Amino acid sequence: MGLAWQQGPLASKTVGRFLVDQPIPERLLFAEPLRRRMRVRLGDEWIADSEDVVLLHEPGRYPVAYFPLADIGDGMLVPEERATTHAELGATAWFGVRDVKRAAWQHTDLPAHAATLRDRVAFAWRAMNAFYEEDERIVGHAADQYHRIDIRRTSRHLVVRDGDRVVAETRRPLALYESGFATRWYVPRGDINTAALTPVDGQTFCPYKGLASYYDVGGRKRAAWSYEEAWPEVERVSGWVSFEPDLVEVDLDDRRLALEPGQVVSPHGVDRGLDVDELRGR
């Protein structure tokens, strides 16, 4: 997702390539200043508050925010006996935060080229109650500054079928282009046989789009989804429906779509203490 996740340029399965004459390492880590004030809360306490956060992009992982020790509250970090070794960054010490175990870590023997992370600590996202940029809660993971979503209207002919039944047919879909993913096509409700959609329990959330609801299509489980109240940045798809091309038949201009590389999402779980009402009120 963005720089190092899914099919981004630093991801292990990127669809692009660097135009260089020498092979580059299979794994490249990239660190940069976040240049935003970021805060961490556990319970009713602010654990860290910094304008000097460094964001680490590591292949196959969501971005991780590293805080300078000087910007972490006194007595917040409780050293643990646990120690691990990071393949590129070396020995790693772990800390509890108040009474939460394995909640933070620090690379204690960094190679010279990774000195930008020296004397910095990262917090396990789901171990904390919340992360903020200024006074606004950030959900899912630290915001990837390279993640982008563009939505474009089109007059292309899109048809969705479940066997012999036409579930949707439109000449006004929206194409949603999202960093690291293949195109997703969204259909307006007016062009869908809504009787073919069976709402199912269970929702997921996207840190960039909001809360997703799912539908069975015939006997095909969770074959469609919709952001009923999509966040303002992507409100054009709010209430529209997208279909999984590996579960139902989706034809675009008479070309059968398939599940492309980069369309499988690895779930990151729900943030600690995050509820549906807070997501909707974001």
Image: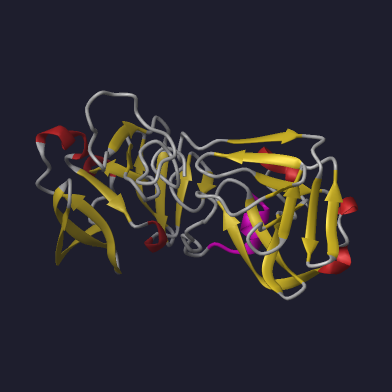
Residue 213 at x, y = what percent?
69, 62
The answer to if 101 sits in the magenta stretch is: no
**Is residue 74 found left or right of 158 in the rendered image?**
left
The answer to which image quadrant residue 247 occupies is bottom right
Give the tally of numbered discs: 0
Q: Which of 117 and 191 lies nearest the eye of the viewer?
A: 191
What residue lies at 21% left-to-right and 39% top-to-bottom?
117
Q: Is residue 130 above or below residue 17?
A: below
What residue lies at 84% left-to-right and 68% top-to-bottom?
196
What residue lies at 34% left-to-right and 24% top-to-bottom?
19
What residue lies at 70% left-to-right and 40% top-to-bottom?
175
Q: Which of 168 and 214 lies nearest the eye of the viewer?
A: 168
Residue 102 at x, y = what percent?
26, 65
Q: Is residue 202 above or below residue 155?
A: below
The answer to which image quadrant residue 11 occupies is top left
Residue 251 at x, y = what percent?
74, 50
Residue 101 at x, y = what percent?
28, 68
The answer to which image quadrant residue 118 occupies is top left
Q: How is the image coloured?
A: secondary structure
Q: Which of 211 and 240 lies nearest the eye of the viewer?
A: 240
- The region drawn magenta spans 274-282
**Is residue 164 found left or right of 210 in the rendered image?**
right
The answer to if 276 sits in the magenta stretch is: yes
